[in-house]
Image (tube, coloured by chain):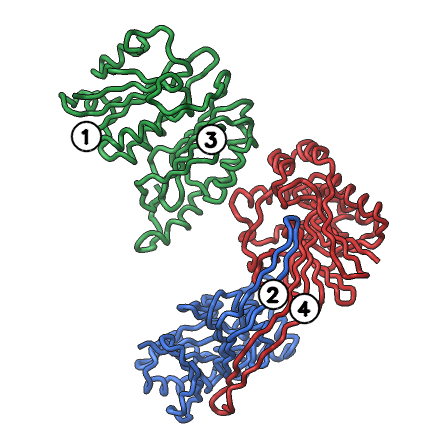
Amino acid sequence: MAMWALLSGLRGDLTVYAAVQAELRRQRVDTLFVLGDLIGPEREANALLERLQQPRRGDLQPHCIYGWWEEQLLAERGFRGERRADALRQSGGEAAVAALLQAVDPGHMAWLASLQFGFVELDCALLHGSSTDVGDSLTADTAPLQLLDRLTRMEANRLFTARSGEQFCVELCGGGIESRLRDLEGERQQHQSVPSRKVIGVGSGLHYTLYDPGSDHIAFRRAGGPIHATGRGFV
Amino acid sequence: MAHAVISCLHANLAATEAVLCDIDQLGIDTITCLGDLVGYGPQPNEVVELIRARQIPSCQGCWDEDIIEGLNSCECSYPSQLAERRGQRAHHWTAAQLSEENKAFLASLPLSLRRDRLLFVHGSPNSQHEYLLPDMNAFAALERVEAAQADTLFCGHTHRPYVRELREGVIKMRLRRAVANPGPDIEREVDLPVRRIVNAGSVGEPRHGGTSATYVIHHEQDDSVEIREVPYDVERTCQAIVAAGLPPLFAWRLRHGFEYAERADDASHVCER
Amino acid sequence: MNRILLISGPPGCGKTSWILSQLQAHKGPCGYLRLAGFPAEGCPQALDGGIDQAVLADHCPGLRDLADPAQALAHPGGDLLALIELPQFQPPADADSSGIDPRLLPQLEALQLLPQRHLSFGRDAELPPQDTLQFNALENWALDLTRSVWDPPSLNSFWFELVNGAYGEVYRAKALMNLPDGRSFFFNWIVSQEGTQFLPLERVAPPEGRPQRLSRLVVQGKHLDAAGIEATIADCLLSDAVLELQQAPQRPSGAPLLATR
């Protein structure tokens, strides 16, 4: 039976990554997705980036996508056309941009530039933010209409997101809407039901998420925490 | 008070004049334009100058943006290689014809206009390139209006006029947070607001099966919306297309009520640029 | 006994469709020959260019090409059904007792294909009734499209424009055209019938560059804008680079071709 592990927000912290890997080794996880923010301005990320590209023996092979921090770095280093790290410059100033540039050896840029925006596995979309933007921060408190829109855009039943850093699961489980349309041909009415769908926040750093695509079971974990804490994921 | 909304003039002077004449005859003096003043049609300068002379507030359409920014609409918005090549030919012709002053005017247009809880855009609040088709997912449609903090969203771009009211929306949800701070699952029922999307159709390039220009009138007294069809001298524009050296196929398509180039059909497609 | 029939009629009357139904119903060996016909006054002959032969051969495996003497003569008795198609605007005035135009005899004798009967659309009740079209003074226009591959949505738009009169009054349009997925489509349209007949050929070309098989467009009509048709077609055909992009994922290895043939 397949089991996925999803993590994000490592921000260059090899110790955290090693702790998660060590824990995954003791569980029946067979696929590891790292949903972006591999790097950050706080610390040098080169050792982590090397380990992600060349896993150690015993490591679960990571499947990585780029996140908001990679997007800022790629833009600043000219990989996004004329755009630069404007969002970071606005929120953190020049110092944050300089720290980010410092954190990553230019030798890693080609690999970072090759990372995808997201994965679509089975009926699940695995993204850093959402289908609208890598920086789209979805939380447990995001309006359900917005969550439904993000799911609809991906044509996915499950959307795994990491941008907010929160661990949560919002299940859309009922409801509907009436739509009345008038055009040159006349008037018609249509009812649309809310499809049964979920948005899952996978967490950040030591906080990661396990997902069993066979049973749709979701379990939130913290590396170093009790592994067998109630797997009370709702199915 | 009544208020007219026009869109997608596409350098078709005869159609623009006919629609403005219709509006004048109805005694309406507030007009808003949703962009695409130029593109495909043969009289870009004349149409821009008419809108400027009448001082009609306008937002910027995707063609207006492309003409000033260089060909910017993404390839995937063209449904075929043929449509793309024809679109590019029209683009280059229009860019060469437009005066610098008129280009500067198009560059100065805002992406949206707002009057209280009415929002005016070309495509959608997200992008000039996004199509809000009449049959798009109702929740996604509602989200566009709601995210823009409007009650009624006026848009164009699809060239098909419609009024769509979204009401009685409810979403039931179950929320669970992380194990560290579990608490009970929260179940909630969220009522969605009533919102409306009004598409003004197209003055210069209809796509409703006929050749008439279309636009809408918003009657503010009872908040009703009227879709207007205005016949105009199509042959005058067709002759101008041929005389201008634009592809004669554009004249044939316009004369038969087909768009100059077919439109992309993907409602949810958003240009990434 | 071999049955040899000559089928004639004006372009678009349904000769090839009727012939296909006869060939498919026949249990024994079948053969087909398309004669060029004679230019009647004001009626240039249809430049089929092998489209009918290619469609019939695709749908009737083992169909003998009777234009090839080796295949035509290899039927010593038996139950061969040989159908000979002749585009002809009017039934011949000067015919022998079997109704066959004497000008055809030398060619048919050489192939030992003397028809037992001549059936003509509009004259013989065995054939389906034809829509009578005035084909006087029609222009014929043809374009060789061998090795050309279409962008499918562009082909759709072009065909829509063509049969709806964007390039002059079209009475008849017929084509075999290649798509990037290796399929070849037979398009057949006539003004008196509703809609276009679209028929994919059974044989699919491998996704390895440009197919070599027959591809051709034939148009009959009035005031045809040949330059306009060609200009639009040029906008619809795929370049080598785009074709390669579309074909590479279809190849088992997904590997790029070393050289585009």
| Vertical side of B227 occupied by C189: above or below | above
- Is tag 1's residue or tag 3's residue first in the polypeptide sequence? 1
The verdict on a common chain for dots 1 and 2 is no
- Would you call the spot at circle 2 few (<14 residues within 10 Å), some (14-19), or many (20 or more)? some
Kind of residue at disc 1: Gly
> Chain drawn blue, letter?
A
Kind of residue at disc 4: Val
**Whether residue C72 is visible:** yes
What is the spatial separation of the Cα atoms under label 2 and label 4, in whole angstroms?
10 Å
| Vertical side of A86 occupied by B6: above or below | above
State the residue at coordinates (38%, 91%): A227
Callout 2 secondary element: strand
Q: Quadrant of residue C121?
A: top left
> Chain drawn green, letter?
C
Between label 2 and label 4, give the one nearer the viewer: 2
Residue picked out by circle 3: C193
Left or right, C54 with respect to A146, comes to: left
| Chain assignment, label 3 | C
Residue picked out by circle 4: B194
Camera-side residue of C229 and C71: C71
**Mark 2 and mark 3 in contact (Cβ < 8 Å)?**
no
Q: Quadrant of residue A31?
A: bottom left
What is the spatial separation of the Cα atoms under label 1 and label 2, in whole angstroms?
63 Å
| Vertical side of B53 occupied by A201: above or below | below
| Chain assignment, label 2 | A
Q: Colour of chain B?
A: red
Camera-side residue of A32 and A219: A219
Callout 4 secondary element: loop
What is the spatial separation of the Cα atoms under label 3 and label 4, in whole angstroms?
49 Å
Kind of residue at disc 3: Gln
Residue picked out by circle 2: A178
